[in-house]
Image (cartoon, helix red, strand yellow):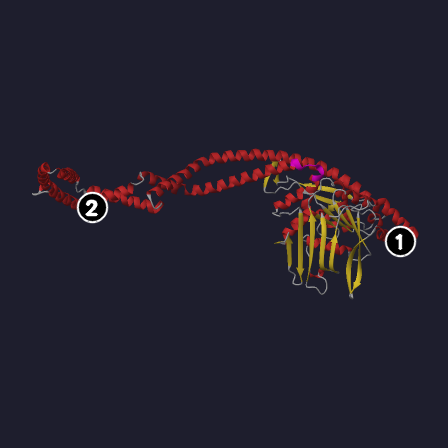
Amino acid sequence: MLCELHIRDYALMDELDITFGKGMTVLTGETGGGKSIIVGAVGLVLGERADQDVIRAGADGTSVEGVFDLSGFPQIRERLQSLEVHLDDSMLYLRRTLNRGGRSRCFVNGHSVPIVFLKQIGDEIVDLHGQHSHQSLLKTERHLDLLDSFAGLGEARGEVADLFGRLESLRRERDEAARRLAQLEEKRELYQFQVDEIDRARLRKGEREELEAEHKVLRHAERLALTSDQVCNLLSDDEPSASSILSQALRLLSDAAEIDDRLRETAEMLRTTSVDVEEAARLVADYRSRIAWDPGRLEEIDDRLQLLKSLERKYGGSIEAVLQYGERIAAELQSLDRGEEDREELEATIAELERQYGERAEALSRARSRAARDLAKRVERELDALGMSRARFGVQLEKPVQGAFTVAVGADRYGATERGIDQAEFVLSANPGEPLRPLHKIASGGEISRIMLALKTILANVDSVPTLVFDEIDVGIGGRTAERVGTRLRAIANERQVICITHLPQIASLGDHHFEVKKVEAGGRTVTTVHVLSDDERVAEIARMLGGSKITETVLKHAREMVSARSSGGADAC
């Protein structure tokens, strides 16, 4: 609900701070006193269009701030959280500024936001009814929501929305799979050639390093053979050779060790070394026997290395990368082979969900048709009581043939949305003989307000908008009709905050809070003020509304009776 409104330099207002309360608040005053200006300021902070003309003369700009308490409206808080608006203690602060250059700035809880975002939030928390455009009744897209709320179709609509969401997801998955498979199909021949090429190569991890090592040995075979011969000669073949020298030294040292035990350890060292040299000579001789110049093998290795290098250039920087690439495109080819089977399975799932969606949407549509007739009758009865006895009201339901996608419903196909297959629009014939036409094309501000009052009366327990503002709801009515309007406003005020601008004492006397709006001169300038009336002041204001400029004791008595009989004594402020 709206708790506070702070207005600066707007129209005839320099600085105005208004505190609103729960229940029903009425604003009264002489014609032209500026009552509708307050509604305009509320519209400004809710994101309505505005131009520089609303800036007070002599000021550089205007600003309006609204403070809202949403503690009793968890659904609103959840929707605001979905818009990433986080509340502290359920309080919401909206502010709008407008300067002479035409620049507008919007703030939500102190954070700058685009005006479209401010308007989104405003649509959730306030309904304005009168000469201003911020009215849910004039937004055709909201009509279906109001009808569904009236009919209690939230669960059925939720099932339809769930099926629609699953269908959208699966259809996107199918389309993406088809796009990917089409791209793969274009590359099938190339991928098959690449897989075959890699398979024919029969690659092994580490093969390149092995081949390069073997290639190096073959390329230097002559040098390795010569070196091996020289080592064998030095170790065992030449005279004297390393082996013969060590043997001679070992004999000498062994003989000396017979005399001096301290030489035995050294003699053992020579014996070990002699054995190692003989083993080394044998190994080198064996290595030399296996060295052979093989030009054919060298050429074979060269060719193999060239093949590996070619594959690495094409498919990766190493054999491991080539093998990985081959596995990947082989898997892509397998997915192509499985693609048709997967597509058929996905299509079958989609077809089944479309069947379920069609059944649920058709059932929802039938329920809406029944509810539309019931709602129209009830609205017409309310309008009759509100002074529009000859008005006809209707809910036109249509099934568009286009949407995100179409589904079969019976023998026809209709556009599917998360709200089902219907579009709804409220239509009105205000006078006999006139056809039913859309509300936004024919209804006046007063008619719109009374139609919305009728709907809000019917939907009081299911509508979630916390605050309703009515301007010009009493145009062209009086007497018993005015009493009925006031009674319905009070009934709605039991569930929602109601702010009503009125010229009728029958309505004004029913308010929980009563503000007087008037123009005064201050410092040589005209300003609009808002004054909270005391009990005595309220009686005087009701008397003025009853008797005009001539207020008799009889009029005052009547005013006292109206206030004492119909006022609840005032609801709490925020």
Please tell me whether mark 1 sits on a helix, a strand or a loop: helix
Mark 1, other Cα within 10 Å: few <14 / some 14–19 / many ≥20 = some
**Is residue 388 at all visible to an observer of this figure?**
no
Per the rendering, the mark at residue 97 is none
Q: Image quarter for residue 70?
A: top right
Q: Which residues are magenta?
A: 149-156
- Residue wearing tag 1: 547
Please tell me whether mark 2 sits on a helix, a strand or a loop: helix
Q: Distance of mark 2 from mark 1, alpha carbons?
A: 124 Å
Q: Earlier in the sequence, mark 2 or mark 1?
A: 2
Q: Does residue 155 show up magenta in the picture?
A: yes
Q: Amino acid at mark 2?
A: Arg
Query: Residue at (69%, 41%) from the top-left corner?
Result: 397
Q: Is residue 222 left or right of residue 383?
A: left
Q: Is residue 414 left or right of residue 297?
A: right
Residue 573: image location, x then y, percent: 75, 48
Q: Amino acid at mark 1?
A: Gly
- Of 433 and 59, the residue lying toward us: 59
Query: Residue at (90%, 56%) from the top-left corner?
Result: 550
- Of 9 and 443, the residue lying toward us: 9
Q: Does residue 522 show up magenta in the picture?
A: no
Mark 2, other Cα within 10 Å: few <14 / some 14–19 / many ≥20 = some
Residue 107: image location, x then y, percent: 64, 54
Dominant secondary structure of the magenta stretch?
helix
Residue 427: image location, x then y, percent: 73, 45
Q: Nearer the viewer, mark 2 or mark 1?
A: 1
Residue 569: image location, x then y, percent: 82, 46
Q: Residue furthest bottom?
A: 524
- Residue wearing tag 2: 219
- Of 65 and 98, the residue lying toward us: 65
Q: Image quarter for residue 350?
A: top right
